[in-house]
Amino acid sequence: MMRYIDMEKPGGPEVLVPREVERPVPGPGEVLIRVIAAGVNRPDILQRQGHYPPPPGASPILGLEVAGYVEATGSGRRRWHSGDPVCALTNGGGYAEYVVVPETQCLTVPGRLSMEEAAALPETCFTVWSNVFDRGHLKEGESFLVHGGAGGIGTMAIQAARVFGARVFATAGGDEKCRACERLGAEIAVNYRKEDFVDLLRDATGGKGVDVILDMVGGDYIQRNIRLASMDGRIVSIAFLRGSRAEVDFMRVMMKRLTLTGSTLRSRSSAEKARIARLLSRHLWPRVEAGEIRPVMAARFPLAAAADAHRLMESGGHIGKIVLTVEGG
């Protein structure tokens, strides 16, 4: 048996309760991970609220990233062995003492990091790499803007864009959050509660605009991003905190030759996730190993206090990543 966090029904954080269930068994090409820590992410909130159901075949248990030790392996080619320290992008099931994960979605735990820090990497890094570099094609010398720069995705995106040679900007909801973004490498962090990021960053770029924009806000930001984007700019949407509908002037899109794109991660195939894992291992993990990139840790909660972790995330009062720790791990 193992402990896990059950979602009794869709609703507020109070629906998350500790329970016990049989430990999962790894199938062919899978590993069973003894979880030490699990990351808390915005999709977990949406799933708890009933807005983001798991794809067919995925675990209904919340949790999309973990770090821990390989406990057992399924049949087939074995990349990992019992006792190996790994962090992993899961298909669900991370809020538990044990989780089964495809072996190709596991990565080594960087030597400089604790297990708690390692648990803050997979969902964030898979998302940043696949959207900023794969879809956004951010290149050295270009400019980059991330909205929500003080969150888990934002703090990682700032660091990754900086180490790969981009000029980095961010928006955040408060002066303290803006200073945190600047310490991570943002040249300018705009407090959207006080300033208009379009005018300020257009001036900062000498009227050129921003080459790549990572947006998780949506709503009125969609048209504002189009106004700010440079010629041949790329705007990548990954969430819609202000809604997914907007009135858009497509004349600007056409005249600037813009690319509007976006993606989700959880519904992608195992082969696609494996491809991203290989790219992370090749390009990003050496930067983490060198200490050039490190997850920003906001708070740690014991597994049984998952509801409190969700309350903090929904409050928006944190900077960086929230993780759950498994007692006795």
Image: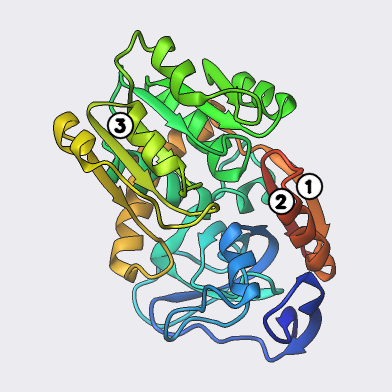
Q: CA distance from mark 1 to mark 3?
A: 30 Å
Marks 1/3 in contact by CB < 8 Å: the verdict is: no
Q: Residue under circle 3?
A: 138
Q: Residue under circle 1?
A: 299
Give x and y (percent) for residue 290.
52, 28
- 132 relative to 7 in the view: left or right: left
N-term mark: 2 or 3: 3
Q: Quadrant of the C terminus?
A: bottom right
- What's the residue at 47%, 34% (across, down)? 146
Amino acid type, label 3:
Leu
- What's the residue at 28%, 44% (across, down)? 134
SS type, badge 3: loop
SS type, badge 2: strand
Label annotation for residue 322: 2
Amino acid type, label 1:
Ala
Give x and y (percent) for residue 318.
74, 42
Task: Reply above or below: 147 against 68.
Answer: above
* Residue nearest the observer in this picture, 40 or 295: 40
N-term mark: 1 or 3: 3
- 233 relative to 159 in the view: left or right: left
Give x and y (percent) for residue 187.
52, 15
Mark 2 closeness class: few <14, some 14–19, many ≥20 residues within 10 Å: many
Amino acid type, label 2:
Ile
Q: CA distance from mark 2 to mark 1?
A: 5 Å
SS type, badge 1: strand
* Residue nearest the observer in this picture, 50 or 60: 50
